[in-house]
Image: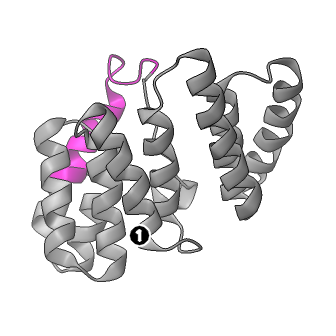
């Protein structure tokens, strides 16, 4: 958690230098959420959307990131998370980075069949999606399907040891150290 507090301080400084950068504002929103500052998080994501539209940058990824944060944390309603993720889908189409968080959210709500469907769809879209492999395997363990979970974890280990896989990624999931 200390890492998020440090990152929050750095992103606040960065917004003084580049106030019209939607990526900086979206990451500021993520850091606020991870430090439990929900109102500030929402304001930062809203500002990221405004700025992105102003400078002509696509906004689907902001909705995706915002929906991901909402899906992971129970401060918000699931409807808000689904709304943000649905907006991302309507603007960009379905991606593993959207389906994975939906699977996580359904799992936490106890909707196991829907969770499985979202996780499976995520892996169909991107078979090596790190977030999905991580949380789908945790889900499977929680419902007693340990054999399948072990296979997913083995695949994840291979991927994480692969230098090509570990190159700079377009989207890095929001992981807690204790989650991995």
Is 33 placed above or below 168 here?
Answer: below
- Asked if residue 157 lies in the magenta stretch, the reply is yes
Q: Is residue 132 visible?
A: no
Is 122 placed above or below 16 here?
Answer: below
Toward the bottom, the furthest residue is 110
Residue 163 picture location, percent across and down: 36, 18
Foreground of the two, 170 or 135: 170
Residue 50 left/right relative to 139: right
* Residue drawn at (66%, 54%) of the image: 42
What secondary structure predominates along the stretch shown in magenta? Answer: helix
Residue 27 picture location, percent across and down: 65, 38
Residue 73 picture location, percent across and down: 54, 67
Q: Is residue 111 visible?
A: yes
* Residue drawn at (41%, 69%) of the image: 79
Query: What segment carries the magenta color?
Result: 151-168
Residue 93 picture location, percent across and down: 23, 35
Residue 8 left/right relative to 103: right
* Residue drawn at (43%, 23%) of the image: 169
- For label 1, the SS is helix
């Amino acid at each position: 958690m200390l890492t998020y507090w440090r990152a929050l301080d750095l992103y606040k400084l960065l917004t003084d230098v580049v106030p019209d950068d939607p990526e900086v504002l979206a990451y500021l929103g993520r850091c606020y959420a991870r430090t439990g500052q929900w109102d500030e998080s929402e304001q930062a994501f809203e500002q990221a959307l405004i700025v992105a539209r102003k400078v002509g940058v696509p906004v689907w990824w902001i909705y995706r990131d915002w929906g991901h944060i909402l899906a992971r944390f129970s401060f918000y309603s699931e409807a808000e998370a689904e709304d943000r993720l649905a907006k991302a889908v309507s603007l960009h189409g379905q991606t593993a980075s959207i389906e994975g968080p939906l699977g996580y959210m359904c799992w936490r709500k106890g909707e196991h069949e829907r969770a499985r469907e979202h996780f499976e769809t995520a892996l169909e879209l991107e078979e090596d999606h790190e977030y999905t492999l991580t949380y789908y395997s945790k889900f499977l363990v929680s419902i007693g399907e340990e054999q399948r979970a072990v296979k997913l974890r083995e695949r994840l280990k291979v991927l994480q040891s692969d230098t090509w896989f570990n190159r700079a990624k377009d989207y890095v999931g929001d992981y807690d150290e204790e989650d991995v």
